[in-house]
Amino acid sequence: MSPDAGFSAVIPAGGVGSRLWPLSTPDHPKFLLDLLGSGASLLQDTVARVAPVSDRIMIVTGAAHVSSVRGQLPCLGDDDVIAEPSPHDSMPAIALAAAVLERRHGPHSMGAFSADHVIRKPEAFREAVRIARAAAEAGKVVVIGIEPRGPSTAFGYIKAEAPIEGMEGVRQVEAFTEKPDASTAEAMLAAGSHYWNAGMYVTRTDVLLGHLSRTHPSLEQGVRELAEAWDGPRRAAELDRIWPDLTCIAIDHAIAEPVAAEGGVAVVPGDLDWYDIGDFAVLASMMEPGPDGVRLLQREAGVTTIDAPGAMVVGGERPVVLVGVGDVTVVDAPDAILVLGRDSAQKVKQAMEGTRKR
Amino acid sequence: MSPDAGFSAVIPAGGVGSRLWPLSTPDHPKFLLDLLGSGASLLQDTVARVAPVSDRIMIVTGAAHVSSVRGQLPCLGDDDVIAEPSPHDSMPAIALAAAVLERRHGPHSMGAFSADHVIRKPEAFREAVRIARAAAEAGKVVVIGIEPRGPSTAFGYIKAEAPIEGMEGVRQVEAFTEKPDASTAEAMLAAGSHYWNAGMYVTRTDVLLGHLSRTHPSLEQGVRELAEAWDGPRRAAELDRIWPDLTCIAIDHAIAEPVAAEGGVAVVPGDLDWYDIGDFAVLASMMEPGPDGVRLLQREAGVTTIDAPGAMVVGGERPVVLVGVGDVTVVDAPDAILVLGRDSAQKVKQAMEGTRKR
């Protein structure tokens, strides 16, 4: 642990957001989009949120998105972006960032925060990070737990035990659970001490890599070798040699679950007003309708509705006219025009795949 | 009556087809569109249908559409198009054509046939015209009556009396009725001797203008003066002077109804498989769905549907993707994107007006 190395924010920026297609596409993935019409992309919002509690920021993204990421974040230095040659889920991305950061700055504390989440209480988020950082520096893997707003079946849950003595706001984690069915979700909400898992982890680089060396030793070995070469002339050659064989696995499965079973994970619960905008139904629920009852996103041109309550229209420059269709979402995007009915938001990915096959 | 003047087909080509917006627009009105994907516009189909029974064809259309009409009908001569400076409903258009034709060829028989109707039994149509022409040459105003396919409330009806002696296939008209309510339509269908009025009239030019001189003398006077000047240098000046004040009225009200009350109208019933594609619901009913159940018009690009039975997609080059919406029509047109639900086709005109106001 290097006491002066400060805190690193690692932001894995991956994932297309397939259920938001054709608004999101492989070329314009969700994290690059201004999904809430705020004027900033989810990635830009994420960076603005973590910057006040971080000494540096490291973005890990696909090679194809590096120039878009740099375009949205002109303040990033050359060293602040890791380009993945291919997607390998979150653990290799976060572990490589940890190894590179540790080689540069010595062991220090870091947090991993998804690039495409929404947090409407950023100060509460930063306070949770400060608390989590203190627990992490004491050796814990710390997860930030989201106070449930309801019995959601869309997220995994964190089950908390007693508060950890001497660490205010920190509780021991008993276990992580997969996405529950409705009755289990109701029971967890009623029982209390269960939090949504938003995949936000705070830990020391050496603690993270130490756990990884036990749970997935070849993965730890691989990212250590990559980090050794990273800031020298062999980076590309080593990436070509090592990256393709690294295990594809999420940090939840690679670290959080096995370490929790050993008692090594703590949770900092927070009321962050956190959202993962997974599909158009979630997006619509977060938007205020205009005076005519229509929700508009990325759109200047008007919408005319007759007998069409609950409409959302996304993108496009031509007038959109809705007659006799209720609760419909229309997306006018370069790749396709999507017309989506009520309660069907989950089927958009399937529709995208069907369209791409043609 | 000039026995050698033959038969003139007058085709009033007006009307936007507002309930087919944004497929039809003021710049691309219904009669110029290939609505059934046959490769020919409704106007071209109309000309092809009447040509075998006509010695000449006269199109009456708005000044803005003359070049499009000539583009679609390159065989038209300079004398075969009348450009209306402004729309005045059907009677001034037909009466001016009759007066111009009579001045050129002497009194002779003519028929007026809308440019945007569909007739799937063209030989039956031509046979009806031949029968109607014979009755017209004997002095009648003759309407071609459509055998009802059901108790439609979308059309006016013609009530027929007994057959006229010595004229096979011709019956006296007792009266014209406005569009009926559902129970009246049922009763008329059950009673028989009621035909849909498709606005197809066959008469002698001198008979038509003679009736008009009694029912609307200033209109008759106006078109006679215009005809006098038509083929000389004063056409434009006379149009400027006379046209704006001509009465706006349909031939049904100006001639057919008052003359029927005097016993001067006959009907030639025909089983023509006639359609007026008034809205997208009618259009959909006339199209065969593809193997995936989707009706496509003016469209090459594919359509992906998930839980979206009964879809129709019109126009556009981008993929259209329909998820969880039943019986929906999507029109991807330069002026707008329309999403139309079941049983709402009649409200499209209102939606167009609302959109244009913006």
Image (cartoon, coloured by chain):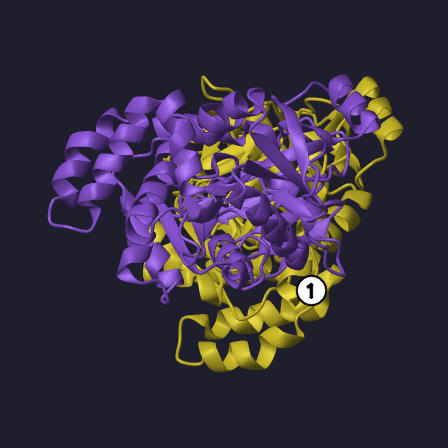
Chain colours: A yellow, B purple
Residue hosting label 1: A248
Numbered disc total: 1
Given residues B177 and B336, the one toward you in this image is B177
Against B48, residue B338 (above or below) is above
The image quarter in which residue B122 lies: bottom right
The reply to whether residue A5 is in sight is no
Q: Residues within 10 Å of mark 1 (few under 14, many from 20)?
A: some
Given residues A159 and A14, the one toward you in this image is A14
Tell me: B251 left or right of A242.
left
User: What residue is shown at x 56% (from left), y 53% (from top)?
Assistant: A205
Look at label 1 and name its amino acid.
Cys
Residue B300 image point, x, y percent: 56, 64
Tell me: B355 left or right of A201.
left
Residue A261 image point, x, y percent: 82, 44
User: What residue is shown at x 20% (from left), y 51% (from top)?
Assistant: B231
Residue B339 image point, x, y percent: 57, 38
The reply to whether residue B312 is in sight is yes
Against A204, residue B342 (above or below) is above
